[in-house]
Amino acid sequence: TRGTSPANTRTTKTKRGTVNICLNQLNNEGIISFQKKYPLTIKLEKKEILTNILPLVKVKDFSTVKMVFDKTHNKNSTKITFFQNPSAAFYEWLGYVWGDGHIQGSTIILTNKNKEIRRRFISLSKEVLGSELNILEKTTGKEGVNIKKVSSICKLLEKNYKLKRGKKKAHLIKVPKELYQCESESISRFIDAFYSCDGYYSQKKRYIEISSRSKFFIIGLKYLLVKLEILSKTHTKYGQYYLTVSGGKNVEKFRDTIKPKFKNNIKIAPSIAA
């Protein structure tokens, strides 16, 4: 943008859409006033700017950030709670997204037939992202949960975890690198969520199996389990990668540490667990 006075002329590469969002916000707060016609004349109503909305890249103290949103086609996305340091609830939520979720445009979609899993995902979404979400639960046809107009979190997932919008993610997912340094609760809840989507327990052979199209995810999962003192093995078959937990003590440790919420049918015979 350029000023008309030589002494105050300044050039910036800010996009027109971003400028329009900022101008509208300042206008709404009574800091400036203008009429939406060409040429645009802006009148400064207040010399001191009191706005509490600014680009995230300009934030110096993240502890003061309460909500974030994104602009899409000159409209604001749903405001979501900002989290600089993700909680255990976030990693559980992410485990469901990694398991049965994907991103389509500005919508996060979880496809799952289990009503209890869908309700858990909705509850976590509100806890992690805030209560202003536009959530649709589909109970017929392709059952699942749609969280609409959340391009802000979609972009954060794309930037931080390489989760591409509109593309299949099964072979691309990896264990979030910061999770290796997290406390056991965050690790356990992440594994439980993914296990709820893509895990299996064999009552007959007494072993736990988790599968993924991503080799790197299965290897990462193996290291997470080592942190929890659970041993596992990995193998591949027909382009699918598997992690298996077997042996009475390891299966029992998995059950007692991960504490599966939905696939909680893990039972250990005393003679085997010993």
Image (cartoon, rainbow, N blue to C red):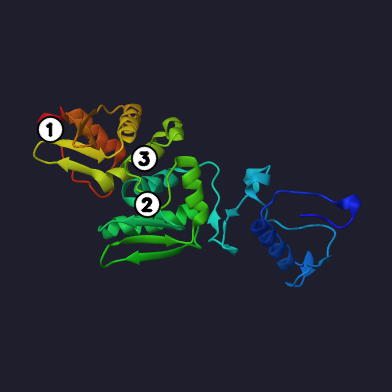
Q: Can you say which quadrant of the picture contains the C terminus?
A: top left
Residue 157, above or below 175? below
Q: Earlier in the sequence, mark 3 or mark 1?
A: 3
Labelled pair 1, 2 in contact (Cβ < 8 Å): no
Q: Secondary structure at mark 1?
A: helix
The image shows residue 243 at horizontal and vertical percentages of 24, 33
Residue beneath disc 1 = 270
Q: Quadrant of residue 169?
A: top left
Q: Which mark is residue 157?
A: none
Residue beneath disc 2 = 102
Q: Which mark is residue 172?
A: 3
Mark 1, residues whose alpha carbon is within 10 Å: few (<14), some, or many (≥20)? few
**Amino acid at dot 3:** Leu
Distance between mark 3 and mark 1 Cα atoms: 40 Å
Distance between mark 1 and mark 2 Cα atoms: 41 Å
The image shows residue 78 at horizontal and vertical percentages of 53, 61
The image shows residue 234 at horizontal and vertical percentages of 23, 29
Q: Can you say which quadrant of the picture contains the N terminus?
A: bottom right
Q: Residue at x 28, y 66 (%)?
A: 139
The image shows residue 151 at horizontal and vertical percentages of 50, 56
**Amino acid at dot 2:** His
Q: Earlier in the sequence, mark 1 or mark 2?
A: 2
Q: Secondary structure at mark 2?
A: strand
Distance between mark 2 and mark 3 Cα atoms: 12 Å
Q: Quadrant of residue 213?
A: top left
Would you say 251 lies left or right of 187 here?
left
